[in-house]
Image (cartoon, rainbow, N blue to C red):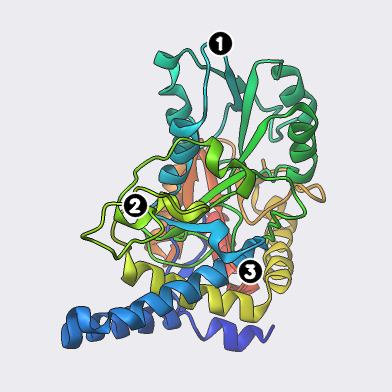
Amino acid sequence: MDRIAFRNQFPVTQQWAFLDHAAVAPLPEPAVRALEEYGRSLAENGVAAFRDWAARLTHVRGLAARLINAPHPDDVYFVPNTTHGIGVVAEGFPWQPGDNVVLPAEEYPSNQYPWMNLAARGVEVRTVPSRGNRVAIEDVCDAMDGRTRILAVSAVEFASGFRNDLDALGEVCRDRGVFFFVDAIQALGAFPIDVQHTPIDGLSADGHKWMLGPEGAGIGYIRREWVDRLHPFGVGANSVVRPYAYSTIDFTLKPHSGRWEGGAYNMPGITALGASLELLLGAGIENVTARILELTDYLCDRAATTGLEVFSSRADGEKSGIVSLVKPGVPPDSIQKACRAAGIIVNNRADRIRVSPHAYNTEDEMDRFFDIIRPT
């Protein structure tokens, strides 16, 4: 990866040291151009340009399939947010009273509330507390029993930055006949996920974090053998095999994940997301991963020199692009505000400072962060 050329695609670097990609990431220049081109096309052509938009949709679907190594592009469907993809599984699963779903206790609310909403259907939610900065696989296994139907985990926990062992958890689910769902929003774009290698049955992720897209355009995945076992959710004209036969009512659902794309597509968001995916895939996800880990290792190595404690696990296989930090006796919101005033964007989660650099960031930007921390 040409780091200078990659960095030059991010206008945000002219104003900020942006270290908060676990929140809402800045758009790279190709995504901005894609939005402008779509807007201009819509202004000048309206629906007359529909074939161009449809072709772009197909192209971006293919990019998303490459990103997760889906068996076929049609196994990927577009979601307006991660929550929608979680709801596809939560609302569509063939639940029976007494069933349960297991998830880490520190999951982001969007991966808790949809499951909690099933209480009226007799579904129990079993939460697994973390052991400090880790989610222990043995604790997850202990929470599961013969009535566990779904395990729902984040690829990377949003507050601690702990990267779950998806391969190991997936094998547990496969052995027990449990549906394995992954909230992938804090991993996709930064770390590889391979749904053919890892037995993931369902996945969802909006594009506005590590995939560097705009809010409101993301991707979902349902393993093909589960498509007919999940009750359709949010069906509409685009859910059927003949979506453009508007005067013919034929409720034959698409035989793949496309059945969950019921209504109008977020065309500008999807086309911009596609531009960002082209940038990331062109750089090589393995190169992006290596650079993010290099930066976060640098961050953690320097932390002690400014009185910071690293909360996040930095063990091999567990560390991610999210580093959770504590400075004893100093409120994290005061650090966040001091950084913002100095042109540095970090965040505050779980009463800790959260730093999340992407591959275009630099060690100099990390040093700027430490310059603010030292006198705080």
Query: Which amino acid, by three-letter code, is at mark 2?
Result: Gly
**Alpha carbon separation for disc pair 3 and 2:** 23 Å
Q: How many marks?
A: 3
| Above-or-below relation of 143 to 55 | above
Query: Which amino acid, by three-letter code, is at mark 3?
Result: Arg
Q: Secondary structure at mark 3?
A: helix
Q: Are marks 3 and 1 in contact (CB under 8 Å)?
A: no
Query: Hey, which quadrant is residue 145 in on the image?
Result: top right
Residue found 62% across the figure and 64% down from its top: 72
Q: Which residue position holds label 1?
A: 98
**Could you say where residue 187 lies in the image, as x and y percent from the top left?**
61, 55
Question: Which mark, by number, is residue 66?
Answer: 3
| Above-or-below relation of 291 to 336 | below
Query: Hey, which quadrant is residue 26 in on the image?
Result: bottom left
The numbered mark, 2 or 1, whose residue comes first in the sequence reads: 1
Q: Which residue position holds label 2?
A: 262
**Could you say where residue 329 lies in the image, as x and y percent from the top left?**
54, 35
Within 10 Å of disc 1 (Cα), the crowding (few <14, some 14-19, many 20+) is few
Q: Is residue 223 left or right of residue 376?
A: right
Residue found 33% across the figure and 81% down from its top: 51
Query: Which amino acid, by three-letter code, is at mark 1?
Result: Gly
Within 10 Å of disc 2 (Cα), the crowding (few <14, some 14-19, many 20+) is some
